[in-house]
Amino acid sequence: MRHSLALRIGPVAFRIGSAWRAPLDALARLYAGYPAPADGLCDFTVRLEPERPWRRFVRPSVAIRGDYVLPDAAPLPLAHGLLAAEMGMNLQMALGQRRWLLLHAATVEKDGRAIVMTGESGAGKSTLAALLGERGWRLMGDEFALVDLDAGTLLPFPRAVSLKNGAIGVMEAEAEPGRFGPRLAGTPKGDIRHLRPNREAIARMGERAKPALILFPRFGEAAAVRGVGQAEVFMRLTQASTNYVALGRRGFDALTGLVRTVPALAIDYPDTETAVGLIADFRRELAA
Amino acid sequence: MTGARLLVRALRDPGAIGECDWPGLVSAARAEQLIGSLAFRMEGRKVPERIEALFEAARRDSAQVRTQALWEAEMCRRALAPLGIPVVLMKGTAFHAAGLEASIGRSVGDLDILVPRDRLAAVEAALVEAGWEHVKPTDGYDDSYYRRWMHELPPLIHKDRDRMIDVHHTILPLTARPRPDAAALIADSVLLENGLRILSPADIIVHAAAHLFADGDLAGGLRNLWDIDRLLREFDSPDFRRRLEERARLHQLAGPVARALRLSHRLYGTPAAAGRLTLADRLFEARLLARNGWGQERRKLLRFAFYLRGHWLRMPPPMLARHLWIKATR
């Protein structure tokens, strides 16, 4: 490939090849301070290439390819090349990762205890995790929680946080301007702006944590908290996992282990400040 | 060395791989669906830690691949049992079911079975009854094309398990020039303990060679050739070599089988009575190796030529013209 970049995020190393320079420049700026993979070895390859040869120049459009591909993934305009790279990395994890149980979840940690937040797109887990990451918690990841198949511990995967629409303004008020990527307007998911996790999150991305609470947040309702039974937690997490089925028995054992040992709550919240307050209460209860 | 060439070298002689373009090897292996086979070949060798972890995951993964493939075969057996007909597993599922060397790390996509042609309608009805559904509408051009000219039913997918089944009644499209003896394929098939059957050893190779060199455009061909290498090594004996020649002639596939022996010997060092490489073989070799260390396909023109050849093999020219016209205008 014409241009390439290698990146390590937590335990996973990627190499990203691109037919254009701009997406990788944007990626390098966003991931400034992340370590390069040792000896250039990587787990996954992402390729950003023109859908047809002439589309490198004429109305350039970026097809997201790599070791693992979705056959019908729509290409993105070159202006959204950074998003294409991010989607490409997510895709490799979702389709190809078999070393850990993968949950579509955001994770934050304090004193070695982690809260795993999962829910449908729009539930606000990314925003909540990003906000907590600026308020004394360590951000372990906003997209995937990696569960060790034997030990049940969580491995950090602190990718740049993908902020959408209203969440962009919330976080612009919290984090230094230098940590943001460009604002990508009019993507298939609306406006997107990426935020680099803070220095602590990057420095400690080799440090595991024990899951202490599973949280199902739901944005836009009056504040409410309810317990969730193990059967429901299990079902929800199978749906939140990208590789539960492919892992077979090991996936089942890891997931049931998690469900049996970690309490779970569902919370409704009208605004992020309320949610942050609720989570601070949980933490005090867990510590007590 | 990188890409497909490095992959072939690693499969053939894993001990000779030291310092190399590991990411390029992994990407090529994933693109060619050979990552599981490679992971087993590299087991116990000196491999950098990050790559070894990835190979280990691929090896574990293949146990699950086998379980799923065999379960799918069992579901099919149950659905077809009332018909009392021979059901012959083919390709990956057959290798796993029979525990052949070729199954080590072998990926499995669709379930491929062979049944007697005169029972095709009953098989289709029984599968639909058991939850398989047509992938494409059953009144369009594709459907009627399949039923009239192909060696298999239009693909069916199971509504709960999301797995495809290809139901064959022979091993080449009816429009292809060679006419394999489908009745002999079934008559000489071997019964397994689970009640399903696999082709006889010689026919397994004839089928693999037909699939690779007498049909299609050679996409993913390195894996099919790797199957052939593993199978030939496992079955090899003077007696078997004679038998393979006989069966290849019977099925009118002596040419593709001979080419399979030559190229398998050439790329994977298979011990086989392979003749000298022809000029055409070199084109096949170049096509098989057309992948770089980023996992990208290379040699666009050559690939296109093989794409055209694939259609040429499948159809006489007037039919090809009509087919391409319909495909282009819808």
Image (tube, coloured by chain):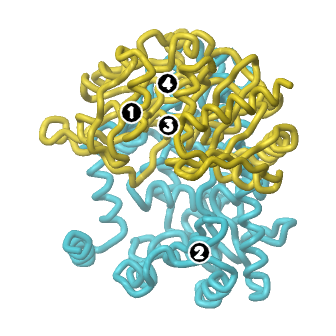
Q: Dot 3, crowdedness within 10 Å: few (<14), some or many (≥20)?
A: some
- Tell me the mark number nearer the camera, choosing from 4 and 1: 1
User: Which subunit holds the residue at mark 3?
Assistant: A
- Tell me the mark number nearer the camera, choosing from 3 and 1: 1
- Nearest the viewer among A1 and B47 is A1
Q: Residue at x 75, y 88 (%)?
A: B83
Q: CA distance from mark 2 to mark 1?
A: 52 Å
Q: CA distance from mark 3 to mark 1?
A: 20 Å
In which quarter of the view is residue A23 placed? Answer: top left
Lower position in the chain sequence, tag 3 or tag 1:
3
Q: Any mark on residue A90, and which?
A: 3
Tell me how many marks there are.
Answer: 4
Lower position in the chain sequence, tag 4 or tag 1:
4
Q: Any mark on residue A14, and which?
A: 4
- Chain A: colour as depicted: yellow
Residue B236: in sight, yes or no?
A: no
Colour-to-chain, cyan: B
Q: Dot 4, crowdedness within 10 Å: few (<14), some or many (≥20)?
A: many
Q: Are marks 2 and 4 in contact (CB under 8 Å)?
A: no
Q: Are marks 4 and 1 in contact (CB under 8 Å)?
A: no
Q: Secondary structure at mark 2?
A: strand
